[in-house]
Amino acid sequence: MITLDRGIVERLVRDALTKQLPNAQGRPSLGVQPKLVVNVSARHAHVTPEDLERLFGKGHQLKPFKWLYQDGFYAAEETVTVIGPRQRIIPNVRILGPCRDHSQIELAFTDAVQLGLEIPVRKSGDHRDTPGCWMMGPAGMIRLERGVIRHERHVHVGPKDCEHYGVKDGDRLHLRVKSDCSTVLEDLLVRLSPASKLEVHIDTDEGNAVNYPRATKFELFK
């Protein structure tokens, strides 16, 4: 007769249950923790192909300067000057590529104060009740009637990430930051795309508030 050590039996049972039952946060346990990347997104612009030509000349194409974490997206070499009320300006606002079907400016609140604008927090592309501005490039200027926003903090996820965290597109997650200014940033918008890699975007104000360069740990949770 073979007698098994009780501790070994308990561990085997516990491991089996862990694989079958939801974890303490109510999401499936998939074994491997997804790789979480947190990046600070500085002020930037998105432009349509038509607006790009008005700013930089007929037939102009964006030139990649630095590739971003999400595949296919990049910071372009091209920058614009953003002009607010009473000629307040922010120069060298970088355009992100590729071109989109709408033009918009994404700022932190501190940037908006510098420009003299009151901006709402919006999902990218949601321009309802938003102020406009002027954009100036080397070939011309354009007037945006609306589209200056503070892009709400968000997390890009793929299907496996949604399964891991138990969320769907449009849901909310929280981000715990461990640093010498530890805090929890609540209600990050979940943005699902089949090709997305797990990545959180916060703006420069939020990055400064948590002392992002000194952060030692990030954790997403419901």
Image (cartoon, rainbow, N blue to C red):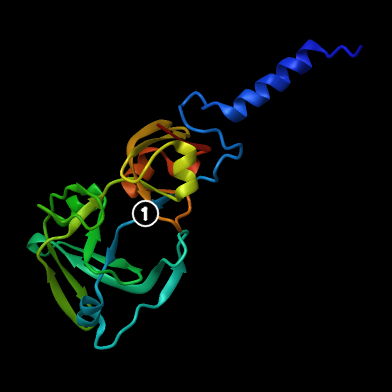
Horizontal relation, residue 67 to residue 14: left or right: left
Q: Is residue 188 left or right of residue 49?
A: right
Extreme residue in the front direction: 1
Identified by mark 1, the residue type is Ser
Q: Secondary structure at mark 1?
A: strand
| Image coordinates for residue 203, horizontal then vertical, percent | 33, 49
Residue sitting at x 24%, y 88%? 58
**Residue 23 location (% of width, % of height):** 52, 26
* Towards the viewer: 133 or 174: 174
Q: Is residue 37 visible?
A: no
Q: In the figure, 4 relative to 145: above or below?
A: above
20 with respect to 123 (left or right): right
Q: Which image quarter holds the C terminus?
A: top left
**Left or right: residue 206 compared with residue 194:** left
Residue found at the far bottom of this picture: 58
Q: Position of residue 107 (x, y in %)?
A: 25, 54
Write the residue at 54% across / 43% down.
34
The quarter in which the N terminus is drawn is top right
Locate residue 145: give its quadrant.
bottom left
Does 51 appear above or below 194?
below
Count of marks, rendered view: 1
Mark 1: give few (<14), some (14-19) or many (20+) Cα within 10 Å: some
Query: What residue is drawn where x is 43% and y is 56%?
Result: 194
Q: Is residue 218 above or below residue 95?
A: above
Residue 39, can we see it? yes
Q: Nearer the viewer, residue 121 or 215?
A: 121
Q: Residue furthest right?
A: 1
Residue 130 in the image: x percent, y percent? Answer: 12, 54
Q: Which residue has dot 1 on it?
A: 41
The front one of 69 and 107 is: 69
The quadrant holding residue 138 is bottom left
